[in-house]
Image (spheres, rainbow, N blue to C red):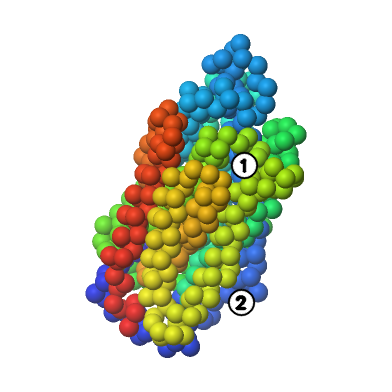
């Protein structure tokens, strides 16, 4: 990663507060190398296409993998029982569902380990040799892992389901899903003016949600025919996604140009010494140097570390929404895996239709309509600095997130769950706005370090929380009744904590003058 300096609340080397009519911040790239509008659109367009394909491919695999694992566990625990339907009562029992929850929970924890160990080294590689190689490697690792996870589903009598966990080792190739996200955000941040990041993040979030909206009926239809159909289609899409990064323009040189002045200042005294080092010594020095930068960034960047913590608390909340929602609804309402994502196919599926699409539609409306409208209205009526406005919106979304999460926890009927999901989904934009604020308050040359730090802290959070949340889901299934929502009760506490951090956070004064 490029050399960085600690962000200090007291420094004042930022331009004065812009007028209401001017952008939040000027483009941080030198005018001679600032990318053209066409180049920006090319990078953003290809990045969005990449995100859409990968999101759809990953989403297609979630319901069928759950269904197949449930059937395998059910047959192993009740070998004399004949599974008559997808909503078989025996397979929805607490023993089967508890084991399923723990297998998935530990899988998510093991997935975090490679990212924790490789985030910084791959960050070094990305900042020295390019974002595309790391993104390509990360996609290759993820695709190989998911291919490995299909083997226990194909041959459960030979490979126990827990052997899926070994697939996490493939994430050492490229750093896993965390590096895919970090590299994508970094490439976009390299070419987009900081003043436009919030709007771009809204659009990227909406594109990902549009993929979910389109894939929901496809997933349900394929799953109703054969669970291996959506698994196969999803794998093909992931393979296509693995082939896409080489077609995305490399943005490293643009960031190097922005960092040139800082690099010259910090490295001039070391240039001669570096030339005398062997390649091995240079690599060791680079890793130590960049690990020091990330450590310094996390410890001394008081203006962002608390907000990073709040960001990661709500990432855990989104985890319970995305990764265990299908199983929670399956247990709460007794719906089949296909029905939980199905669009309207007959009258009795009307509630499933609403449940399968309400979250995605709500998020898209928030990102494309409500948030831009609120941003314009707040700026027009109050004249506050755009960063202050975005912080207000973060706090508002945090409140919605906590309220919606609590309502999901105590849901007792489909209509109440749908209402809860609407409020919950409105609050999940917390992470989109929060990431934009974080990218705006740090120095331009630390954006890559910021995204690496966010990924690292996020993986630590998921490493600890995934088995805990799965354990709570298992305990809730065993207890029954209102305790089915136990993981969402815990998530509510985290949402409240993340919201409290947003209310306690104070923007650096030199950023809002």
Q: Is residue 71 above or below residue 344?
A: above
> Would you say residue 65 is visible in this rendering?
no
Which sits in the foreground, 405 or 310?
405
State the residue at coordinates (30%, 57%): 298
User: Residue 235, percent across and down?
Assistant: 67, 40
Question: For the C terminus, which image quadrant?
Answer: bottom left
Q: Which residue is mark 1?
A: 340
Q: Is residue 506 above or below residue 286?
A: below
| Sequence order check, earlier mark of 2 and 1 | 2
User: Residue 388, percent across and down?
Assistant: 37, 75
State the residue at coordinates (61%, 77%): 36
Q: Which residue is mark 2?
A: 36
Contact between marks 2 and 1 (CB within 8 A): the answer is: no
Left or right side of 338 for 3 = left
Question: For the N terminus, which image quadrant?
Answer: bottom left
Left or right side of 395 for 180 = right
Residue placed farthest to the left in the image? 10
Picture disc at residue 494:
none
State the residue at coordinates (52%, 37%): 332
> Would you say residue 207 is visible in this rendering?
yes
State the residue at coordinates (52%, 54%): 419
Check disc 1: other Cα within 10 Å, few if <14, some if 14-19, many if 20+: many
Residue 400 in which image quadrant: bottom left
Q: Is residue 165 above or below residue 11?
A: above
């Amino acid at each position: 990663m490029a050399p960085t300096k600690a962000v200090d609340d007291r420094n004042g080397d930022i331009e004065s507060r812009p007028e209401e009519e001017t952008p939040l911040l000027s483009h941080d790239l030198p005018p001679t190398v600032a990318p053209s509008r066409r180049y920006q659109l090319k990078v953003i367009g290809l990045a969005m296409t990449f995100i859409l394909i990968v999101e759809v491919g990953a989403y297609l695999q979630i319901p069928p993998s759950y269904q197949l694992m449930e059937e395998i566990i059910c047959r192993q625990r009740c070998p004399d029982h004949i599974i008559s339907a997808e909503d078989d009562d025996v397979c929805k029992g607490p023993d089967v569902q508890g084991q399923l929850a723990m297998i998935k929970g530990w899988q998510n924890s093991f997935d975090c380990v490679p990212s924790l160990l490789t985030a910084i080294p791959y960050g070094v590689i990305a900042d020295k040799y390019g974002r595309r190689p790391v993104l390509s490697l990360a996609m290759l690792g993820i695709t190989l892992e998911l291919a490995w996870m299909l083997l226990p589903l194909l041959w459960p009598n030979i490979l126990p389901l827990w052997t899926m966990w070994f697939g996490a080792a493939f994430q050492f190739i490229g750093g896993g899903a965390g590096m895919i996200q970090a590299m994508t955000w970094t490439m976009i941040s390299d070419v987009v003016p900081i003043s436009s990041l919030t709007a771009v993040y809204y659009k990227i979030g909406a594109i990902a949600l549009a993929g979910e909206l389109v894939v929901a009926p496809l997933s349900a239809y394929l799953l109703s025919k054969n669970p291996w159909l959506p698994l196969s289609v999803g794998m093909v899409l992931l393979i296509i996604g693995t082939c896409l990064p080489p077609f995305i323009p490399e943005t490293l040189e643009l960031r190097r140009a922005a960092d040139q002045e800082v690099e010259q200042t910090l490295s001039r005294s070391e240039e001669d010494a570096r030339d005398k080092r062997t390649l091995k010594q240079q690599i060791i020095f680079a890793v130590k140097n960049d690990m020091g930068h990330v450590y310094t960034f996390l410890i001394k960047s008081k203006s962002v570390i608390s907000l990073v913590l709040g960001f990661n608390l709500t990432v855990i909340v989104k985890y319970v929404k995305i990764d265990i929602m299908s199983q929670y609804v399956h247990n709460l309402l007794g719906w089949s895996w296909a029905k939980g994502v199905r669009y309207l196919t007959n009258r009795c599926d009307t509630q499933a239709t609403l449940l399968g699409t309400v979250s995605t539609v709500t998020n898209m409306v928030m990102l494309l309509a409500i948030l831009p409208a609120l941003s314009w209205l707040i700026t027009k009526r109050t004249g506050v600095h755009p960063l202050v406005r975005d912080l207000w919106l973060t706090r508002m979304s945090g409140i919605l997130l906590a309220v919606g999460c609590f309502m999901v926890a105590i849901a007792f009927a489909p209509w109440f769950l749908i209402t809860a999901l609407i409020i919950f989904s409105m609050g999940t934009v917390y992470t989109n706005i929060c990431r934009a604020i974080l990218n705006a308050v740090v120095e331009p040359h630390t954006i890559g370090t910021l995204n690496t730090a966010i990924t690292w802290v996020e993986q630590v959070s998921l490493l600890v929380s995934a088995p805990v949340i799965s354990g709570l889901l298992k305990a809730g299934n065993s207890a029954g009744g209102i305790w089915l929502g136990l993981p969402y009760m815990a998530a509510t506490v985290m949402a409240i904590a993340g919201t409290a951090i947003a209310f306690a956070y104070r923007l650096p004064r030199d950023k809002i003058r």
